[in-house]
Amino acid sequence: MSFDFSGKRIVVTGAGQGIGRALATALVASGAEVVAVSRTRSYLDSLSAELSSPKLQTLTVDLGDWDATEAALGNIGAVDGLVNNAAVAIIENFLDMTKDGLEKSLNVNLTAVLHVSQIIARGMVQRGKGGSIVNVSSQASMAALQGHTAYGASKAGVDNASRVMALELGKHGIRVNCVNPTVVLTDMGKLWLDPARGGPMLAKIPLNKFAEVKEVVDTILFLLSDNAGMVNAVTLPVDGGFLST
Ligand code: NDP
């Protein structure tokens, strides 16, 4: 799918690896200026080396740290689009769930999404040119998946908070949407390579395959773009039909 993001400045979190990295790459190829935000400097350095483009700016910050996030993004300048993609997947069965696992899941996957969105949306409102925010949620926000209590709760929070953001920011021309992928075989998704886990999941996906990174990226690009100008407050599954079964 091809989009023209010339003249747009887009912030992508979790751009060091996986979906975020592929998204940052696709956006630069589509003419956008991209601020790639992530936790591990070396991954961002390798992205810079790979793209070798003046359109890519990188920013290292642990988004789980509220003050560090404020300091890193507080003066980011004009932004047209934001993709909250960074997340952690800490898989623990409910009875064994740890305080640390729960806190990290909620902090990175939910609190940071709200905080980064607030920082960026305040700038968008002040600038008066509208904008588009896409939050990368998950099918786990709507389905019960073994071991996904904290992760699913964090993503369900993202879905609902996105609708409230859409409600409050619509009058400023800012759209807020979610994409809700099924399994993607990135570093995060590789636990599904275990046939005992992945087999039953595949069997519940009508298309009988996991999502490709590109399929998620293309959906994000659409929601981010002006082509989706009237699409607002949706949670859009990229799940081969999993959630409908
Ligand atoms: P990856 O683990 O491959 O990449 C996640 C990225 O987020 C990494 O670059 C990571 O940084 C960054 N990140 C994590 N924690 C922080 C933090 N505290 N501060 C800054 N950056 C951070 O995951 P995916 O690409 O698979 O996932 C992307 C999104 O898609 C996530 O929101 C995930 O929940 C969602 N998703 C993924 C699915 C899957 O099966 N893969 C399925 C459904 C949804 P670092 O490089 O340092 O590790």
Image (cartoon, rainbow, N blue to C red):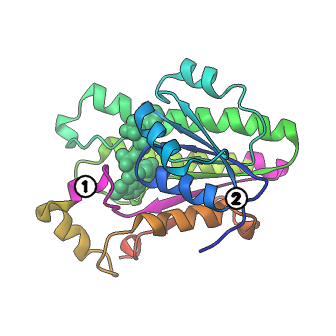
Q: Residue at x 46, y 28 (%)?
A: 64
Instruction: Answer with mark 2 or mark 1, whichever residue precedes in sequence.
Output: 2
The quadrant holding residue 184 is bottom left
The segment highlighted magenta reads: 168-192
Image marks 2 and 1: residues in contact by CB distance under 8 Å:
no
Residue identified by numbered label 1: 190
Q: Amino acid at mark 2?
A: Gly
Does 185 appear in magenta? yes
Q: Is residue 230 left or right of residue 135?
A: right
User: Real-space Cα distance between discs 2 and 1?
Assistant: 31 Å
**Closer to the camera in the image, 152 or 239:** 239
- Mark in front: 2 vs 1: 2
Question: Which residue corresponds to mark 2?
Answer: 31
Q: In the image as oriented, which residue stretches furthest toward the right?
A: 128
Q: Residue at x 47, y 69 (%)?
A: 215
Coordinates of residue 183 in the picture (x, y in percent): 33, 62
Q: Left or right of 35: which side holds 193? A: left
Q: Is residue 40 visible?
A: no
